[in-house]
Amino acid sequence: MEQIRSLAQMIEEAKKLCAAKGKKRVSVAMAEDAGLISAIEEARRDGLIEATLVGDAVKVKACITEAGASVGDYTIIDEKNEARCGIVAVTEVSSKRADIYMKGQLHTDHFLRGMLNKEAGLRSGKVISHCYFHEVEGYDRIFFVADAAFNTYPDLKQKADILQNTVNFARALGVECPKVACLAAVEVVNPDMPCTLDAAALVQMNQRGQIKNCVVDGPLALDNAINEEAAKIKKIASPVAGKADVLLVPHIDAGNMLSKAIVYFSKNETAGIIIGAAAPVILTSRADSPRAKMLSVAAAVMLSHHV
């Protein structure tokens, strides 16, 4: 598969994969929203998924009808208790009756409790992380930003896992050897700036084979990571500088601000996914557009086929 350079292309590649290898099944926790159902219905009609919808069956059916879909095209599990919706939905995945766990209208804490449940959840034994992926006008590739939403202040070991999770996801979208920039405010190692020490250590871990299937460099400031002219002016000789696919942020504050800056200061398409669990996990906001939810579904399908 060639490298995916736009999110519209990602959807088309997901269609091809599913046509060749079969659809995936999404288990949705508290699927009581017509906008959510419309995104799921689009993915279903495109041949990407089948869906199991967990929630109050009367409300779920009403939302299916409101979305212009047919109740007969869905498996519905009646569960009126919000806290139980996450457990029921994630059990469908951990028991292999579904492939992807997706958040509906339940609160995030209930959803994550389901994902992390010791008996029925999707623990993998390693760090679970979040990745925003952005198509930004003017650039010839998708940017993967991690972790801007899940891990708060990761240590070096956690950063290594987050990085590997993100590389694996980028590879599922056709980036054969992702170029990873470990971001900081500067491009030199400074003992007074701990994230630059972590960046230098991650570079060494990559060179020693502890972080695989990618090229890592850092510390790199954002301009040097994504703009070749900026890297050239600062005389940074690196296969990553100016060409980064993956932007590894030092902590959640930097990641959150970076991703929101991309969303609000540029013409872009953006979606997100949780990676590193035993199966792909879609954690969208209840306020996300149906398009963003559709993009997250397509990405989860790509990752599920890749794994």
Image (tube, grey):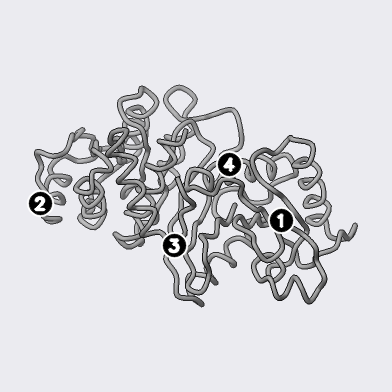
Callout 1–callout 2 Cβ contact below 8 Å: no
Residue 137 vs residue 183: left or right? left
Dot 3: what SS?
Answer: strand
Residue 274 vs residue 153: left or right? left
Residue situated in front as seen by the camera: 10 or 30: 10
Residue at mark 1 to residue at mark 3: CA–CA distance: 21 Å
Q: Which mark is residue 65?
A: 2
Residue at mark 1 to residue at mark 2: CA–CA distance: 47 Å
Q: In percent of the image, x 77 and y 59: which residue is there?
A: 238
Q: Residues within 10 Å of mark 4 (few under 14, many from 20)?
A: many
Say which residue label 3 marks. Answer: 270
Callout 4–callout 3 Cβ contact below 8 Å: no
Looking at the image, is mark 4 or mark 2 earlier in the sequence?
Answer: 2
Dot 4: what SS?
Answer: helix
Say which residue label 4 marks. Answer: 165
In the picture, the quarter occupied by the N terminus is: top left
Q: Position of residue 172 (x, y in %)?
A: 48, 43
Looking at the image, is mark 1 or mark 4 earlier in the sequence?
Answer: 4
Say which residue label 1 marks. Answer: 182
Amino acid carrying label 4: it is Asn
Amino acid carrying label 3: it is Thr
Q: Nearer the viewer, mark 4 or mark 2?
A: 4
